[in-house]
Image (cartoon, coloured by chain):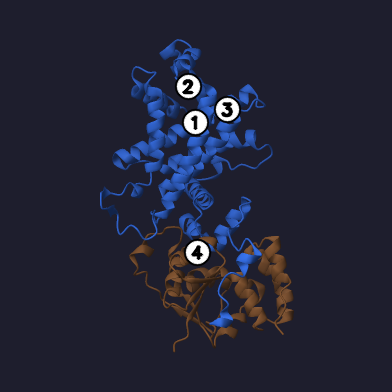
Amino acid sequence: MDRPWLVLDNSVLSAFANAGWFHGPEVWDVDYQLVTSRRIWEQEFLPYHPVENTPEWLSVHKIDLEDARAKIPNKLSVHDWTGVIAAERSERSVLTTNDFAMKKTAEGRDVETLWGTAFAIQTYQKCGISINEFDIGVNDYISDVTLGPDIAAELRNTQKEP
Amino acid sequence: MVGGEISGPNGPSGPDKRNDPFQSFSSVQDQFEAAVKASFDDPDVFLETVIDDVLAMPPEERFEESVTVIEEHYKDEFGQADTLAALLPFGQQWIESYLTELFSQVMTKVAKTAFHTREGGDWLIVLPVLQACNVAFEDVTEDSIEHSEKSKLFSALTALFFRLYREVKQEKNDGTGDFELVAMDLIRALEVIVPITESGAQVLSADEVTASEAYDIARQEGAMLCYVYADISIGRGAELAGLSQVEFKQLLESYDITPRYGPQSVSDLHSGVDLNDG
């Protein structure tokens, strides 16, 4: 059976890269196909985080905005819409983002979502990020995502599962 | 509401007004004209004459002294300025409440143009202009502001509003509205307004920018105000401003606007999918 897609938008890719956790999502590669859209990857992420090669754990897909409803911007950009439409690929696919408007729009279209910070916590607990890497990068992550004090504290206090 | 309910530019009952980016501001113009029609013999002629004379003033006078031109017209029409107050069917407090409410409604409506108009464009310029007018208007009514400064604020406010009024009308009439002019007048108005309303704040000079640069600045400020008033995504705000997401976030932060990233509560943080169940 095809693995469901776990779609990462630029807010998540960028926050992980800024924290030094960019390799972290690879830990989900067995259960999910980690995906982003070509627009997000080439036009938003790479200009600020140039890499020689696309990581093996990440699939970059060209997403066509065929859905007429997506051509009306509503609250999202064209790049955002490629992420939402990618996550509509199958019922079990998930979109992870830090952006309120993007998450709300996706949920309105019955897409499963996950806050980027919850994704960071689950990735850390699954040992995609080491304790040392987490301690070094957590303040940069919090700053990049402008987390409020309660959420920042919850993130900092995350324990690895036994 | 947009979000899957519209299949094209024309709804089932004809052209969709939501595709007219100036529709929301046009309602302001209509109300402005209606509010004065009851008190003037020839309101359209009066209004256009006042606007012509204000806009004909050189910039260095227009944004600080246009109030004198307006007063002269009122005196010519009514004999004295107080006569106008007696003729108008509403008092100052009513005007203040009305304009404050109108401002809030119009800002939200114009910002929501972002929901159905993909491209950022001239319509974005309306937002920072209205914002500047509102800031000036709030201080014009403040008792703590000296009369001479109130006079300058009122001059800047009316000069800017008249410019927007004229160019939006021109745009709707024959598509020839010049919004680079509006953007330059925004910069000039802020040169007068900001030193009075935000003592010590730095302000950009109109001598330092070209009309095209002023337009880009106003467009970016319009995109920021869309982000504030219309709850759009960071990506959408960046798209409207013609910036990358990183640049748009930096712009927001330079104006002390926190990006709307979540979650806002610990329970919401853990409310999503558990990937281990996948």
Do pointers 4 and 1 mark residues of a single chain?
A: no
Specify the quadrant of the image occupied by residue B31.
top left
Tell me what residue is drawn at x 30 percent, y 59 percent: B7
Q: Chain of mark 1?
A: B
Residue B211 appears in the figure: no
Tell me what residue is drawn at x 72 percent, y 85 percent: A162
The local crowd at label 1, few if under 14, some if 14 to 19, many if 20 or more residues have their Cα within 10 Å, is few
Q: Amino acid at mark 3?
A: Lys
Q: Chain of mark 4?
A: A
Real-space Cα separation, disc 2 to disc 3, in angstroms: 24 Å
Element type at marker 4? helix
Which badge, 2 or 3, comes first in the chain's sequence? 2
The local crowd at label 4, few if under 14, some if 14 to 19, many if 20 or more residues have their Cα within 10 Å, is many
Label drawn at residue A102: 4
Chain identifier of the blue chain: B
Residue B269 lies, in percent from the top left, at 62, 67
Q: Chain of mark 3?
A: B
Eyeballing the image, is B155 above or below A52? Answer: above
Element type at marker 2? loop
Label drawn at residue B98: 1
Chain identifier of the brown chain: A
Tell me what residue is drawn at x 71 percent, y 79 percent: A133
Real-space Cα separation, disc 1 to disc 3, in angstroms: 22 Å
Q: Chain of mark 2?
A: B
Q: Amino acid at mark 2?
A: Phe
Residue A148 lies, in percent from the top left, at 67, 60
Do pointers 2 and 3 mark residues of a single chain?
A: yes
Q: Amino acid at mark 4?
A: Met
